[in-house]
Amino acid sequence: MQDGFSTILVASVSVLISMILVIVHRKFSLALRYPQLNLIKNIYKHSSVGCLCLEINGQVVYANPSSSRLLDLKSTSLKDSHETLFNARNKKQMLRVLQEISSLPTSECQIEITQDYKTKPIKLIKVVAHPLLNNKEQITHLFLALTDITTDKMTALAKEKIENEYRFLFERLGIGVAKVFKGKLLSCNEHFSKLLRGSASQLKGQPIKHYVDHNVKVERNTLIPVVSFESVVEFEANVRSVDKKERWCHIRVSQATKDLAIWTIADASHVKESSEHLRQAATVFESANDSILVLDTALVIKMANPAFLRLTHFQESEIKGKKIHFLGGMKHKLPFYQEIQKQLDDSGLWQGEMWHRRRDNQVFPVWMSLNAINGLKGNVEGYVAISTDMTVRKKNEEKIIYQANYDALTGLPNRFYFMQNLKKSMQKAWREGVMLAFIYIDLDRFKHINDSLGHAMGDLLLKKVAKIINACLRESDWVSRFGGDEFAIMLFPIYGAKNASTVAKTILDYLARPIDLNGYDVVVGGSVGISLYPNDGKDAEALLKSADLATFKAKELGRNNYQFFTDSLQESARERVALEQELRKALLNNELFLNFQPQYSFAERKTFGVEVLVRWDSPTRGIVSPAKFVPIAEETGMILEIGEWVLRHACRQYRQWQLEHIAPEHMAINVSGRQFLANNFVSAVLTVLEDEQVSAEFIELELTESILMDDQELAIAILAELRSLGFNLSIDDFGTGYSSLSYLKRFPIDTLKVDQSFVKDTPDNAENTAIVKAVID
């Protein structure tokens, strides 16, 4: 009994010592200054910790039984070198240990080795190495403590594996999972964070009610604490994220303890959207304005929406089970439906125009789209047919086409449509070897009639002129309103220039007659230009240009006549272009100069003024008449620059005469229409006079009668302002324009200059003499 007690006591002491040695082995190695092998042997003889003591060269000097057991070696073999104790991989580790200990003799080194046995399971052994020093601080031995950590390691690995699996499931579950402690978020997985659009650290500690829709009554009953332990409540609600966005979710609350609950949140917005889409689709089907039919694969009608029934006046029972061919009646033949079926088989889609019929057999056009309905496996289960009544659209298209091609006022083809047909007719004339005539008409007195009687009367005049021209043509001819008071005619076919001149003369005869405009008889007249295909132009634009040049010539010859295009007109046009280019250079090269024509008073027998006349001394043409270059300057706008140049140089000369005391009483300067109607005319004139130091009382501004008649109210306002500034005002070439005394008395005019056409034959021409006397009176 005493022996048994001793055995138990020894074993207990051994276990206790082993535990102590494992804990204090570091301190033990540092305190050991000399090798105490006998002491080590006594301490580790019965220890479960393996003990090896090696010389510095690796020779084993001591190994306790536990080390033999751990290394699975016979105790007799422990007398050998350490190289016999370990496998190849462990030998390298031990060599590294020896090297580390040698370099740092005051430290310890710890490694793990794997002991691979042939007949036993693999063991994991922790090896702790300590240097043993003599009193000279020299390493004499190496102490190795070996501990079996296989079980601990396997347990730790198993635990880590389980934790990883649970963590994987926690993070990869596809739904948000969170622990909620006393109503506040304790932790959550990544999916939960994504649903709430915040990080786990940001959400931690936040009340769960901040994120779940407060309007859900059941949610209030599921907030912690829940009535009973392990109770589960499920509901759907809007979950509000950190950035205040809402998402419809399915929520499950599971009570784990009195204070702890597990919340799972799954995004259910797609389910809600699907339900909403189904509801919306049903609503669209029922309330859509477009007609909708559901057909099977054989194009048999299965269902019709209310819009279709309203449009066709059929009852659903009357068309259900019938093929779509039933709707087209006799308007479409079998090949039409066969083509539809072919396209549906090829692409699952067909769209186009087709005819439908109503219950009373009245037909109407529709635009139909047929789309395949695919099943879950991708197979075609039927078709949906959406059709729109095109009756109004067809009428609108016709209206749009008409508006695009016809003049809204006269109903005649517009310029674009006319030119398109002119091109086609020219091609046909070329093929057939016949002629075609282009007649261009510009009304002579339309502007005067429009201004004096009003735009309504002007529009009425254009309508009546359109009817007059149309009445003079054949059915094969075309007439177009090109814009404003211009008309174009295409005569096709013609067999000589005489056909064109006959039509032109007839039209001019009618335009020379009075036209009744609601009680007002007016005579409009016209200037007509004619070009012939193929002689005067190979394409439509060239033919138009030729006719336009001929019209211009007709105006030059006194209006109310017709002229054919000639090569000389083309040459004249080229000359005009060349003259324009040279005139632009004349302004830059100072080729203009002034002539001053005296104004003589027979009554006082003295020169009382001068009139300024501009001249052009061209280096290639010599002196160019104003009658030749002023109209070009008017058309191109160069007259504004020329007019300013004339005014400035004339005033500069007048100021020089004043300084020399030879200046006449006044100086008359002509003003063009474009100058007079420019926005800054008055201020521009005053600027020049101020620059040249000439007073307005010495300047007389001459205007033509036609300028004043273009816009009478504006003209009166400008003339009144000029008169208030001290200018003298005169009307030049009086008698050639409107010469209306009723208009004349409204203008603040100082002088009338009777046109020379009346004066030059006085007193030999009694009529002219009478007119001049009347004007003077």
Image (spheres, grey):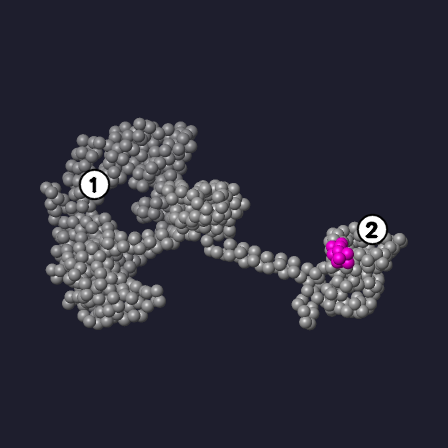
Q: CA distance from mark 1 to mark 2?
A: 128 Å
The kind of residue tagged 2 is Ala
User: As rendered, which of 707 and 699 lies closer to the eye?
Assistant: 707
Q: Identify the image quadrant of residue 81.
A: bottom right
**Label 1, on which residue?**
451
* Residue drawn 36% across the image and 50% down it: 580
User: As rendered, which of 478 and 637 lies closer to the eye?
Assistant: 478
The answer to whether 283 appears left or right of 251 in the picture is left
What's drawn in magenta, residue-wise? Answer: 1-13
Q: For the residue carrying disc 1, how many other residues have a C-alpha within 10 Å: few (<14), some (14-19), or many (20+)?
A: some
Q: Identify the image quadrant of residue 575.
A: bottom left
- Residue 31's tag is 2
The answer to whether 734 appears left or right of 230 in the picture is left
Q: Identify the image quadrant of residue 419.
A: bottom left
Residue 775 percent coordinates (x, y) = 19, 34
Residue 9 forms part of the magenta stretch: yes
Q: Is residue 328 above or below residue 109?
A: below
Residue 390 percent coordinates (x, y) = 21, 57
Does the rendering let one see residue 495? no
